[in-house]
Amino acid sequence: MLKKKLLFGILSSALLFSSSLFAGTVFISNERDNTISVIDTKKWEVTNTFEVGMRPRGILMSSDYSKLYVCASDSDRVEVYDAKTFAFIKDLPSGDDPEQFALHPNDRLLFIANEDDDIVSVIDVESNQVLAQIEVGIEPEGMGVSPDGRWAVNTSETTNMLHWIDTETLELVDNTLIDQRPRHVEFTHDSKRLWASAEIGGTVTIYDVKSRSEVHKIGFAIKGVHPDRIQPVGIQLTRDGRYAFVALGPANHVAVINAKTYEVIDYLLVGRRVWGVGLTPDDKFVISTNGVSGDVSIIDVEKLKVIKTLQVGRYPWGVVAAP
């Protein structure tokens, strides 16, 4: 009996330990607190908070999830942290006011939108060298790199354009007019389509990447919400091509879209002034950052339902998840 109890205890401890290894992590940038909130996805609890540079906004991870990159916009730098210990590793030269950025699949080229300089900076994250500074439109904001590594696309808020950058030559090759105040771009996982939000235009436009031409445009209407408050910003696409999730700003909702038919399926009520959305790597949950209410909403993808709200720092902005 003693041996059985001892064996049971060992097995229970092993199972507990192994299950803890699969607990994912979500990082939230809080732009008013100059902090990053760390969320455990197994318990859906904030487990840590650490300080970073001034006004952190864009946030992303290396492909192996070992490094965390943070745009410290008011500190005019990109900061790199160890994603496990949260220890500071180094600063990267970024240009003035880095807003959003995107990392090439090779894990070396970092494309940074510098809003105050009207340029996109390209940094080698290993050598810390500035490889290029590419002139784009006025107030560059959104930044995306295609999964196949072929294209980098920037949005300019005031010029109302998408700027297509060849990632091999690091040259601007095309400009595409879009609705007013484009904010975010997101490539499909096969690199064939690009989704782009227009905050003031109130639309999301899908483009064919090969021809750089418009495929479809999505508008939004929420019962009881004035159209002026429906301002699309962050976008996330599930890897299976099933859903798109779009943050609708002061409308306080996340739109759920059939990513194949472009039909709006539902509007999910979240916190106030929803800005960013992020998917867990297994596509099971969407996390929305709700700036004015200082919290994040957890959306169950299978149920298409908000299952929990967590208080984080002041004005949560960016979100990225690791397994």
Image: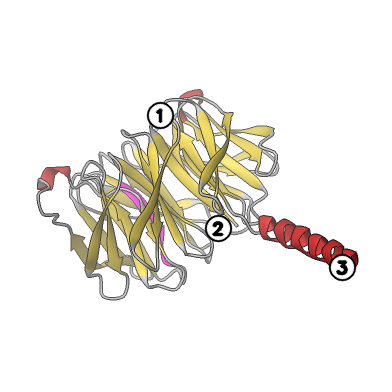
On screen, 104 above or below 241?
A: above
Secondary structure predominantly adopted by residues drawn in magenta:
strand
Mark 2 or 1 closer to N-term? 2
On screen, 176 above or below 208?
A: above
**Of helix, strand and loop, which one carries label 2?**
loop
Judging by the rendered image, the residue that carries numbered circle 3 is 1
**Of helix, strand and loop, which one carries label 3?**
loop
> What is the tally of numbered marks visible in this picture?
3
Marks 2 & 3, CB-CB < 8 Å contact? no
Which span of residues is magenta-colored? Answer: 183-188
Q: Verify whether residue 270 appears in magenta.
A: no
**Of helix, strand and loop, which one carries label 1?**
loop
Mark 1 or 3 closer to N-term? 3
Mark linked to residue 168: 2
| For residue 42, side relative to residue 138 (left or right) | right
The amino acid beneath tag 2 is Glu
Mark linked to residue 244: none
Question: From this viewpoint, is residue 118 visible?
Answer: no
Marks 1 & 3, CB-CB < 8 Å contact? no
The residue at 52%/44% (across/down) is 45
Q: Nearer the viewer, mark 1 or mark 3?
A: 3
Mark linked to residue 314: 1
Marks 1 and 3 sit apart, C-alpha to C-alpha, by 55 Å
Please, which colouring scheme is shown? Answer: secondary structure
**Looking at this view, is 130 or 49 the one in front?**
49
| For residue 132, side relative to residue 244 (left or right) | right
Which x, y percent locates residue 88?
67, 32
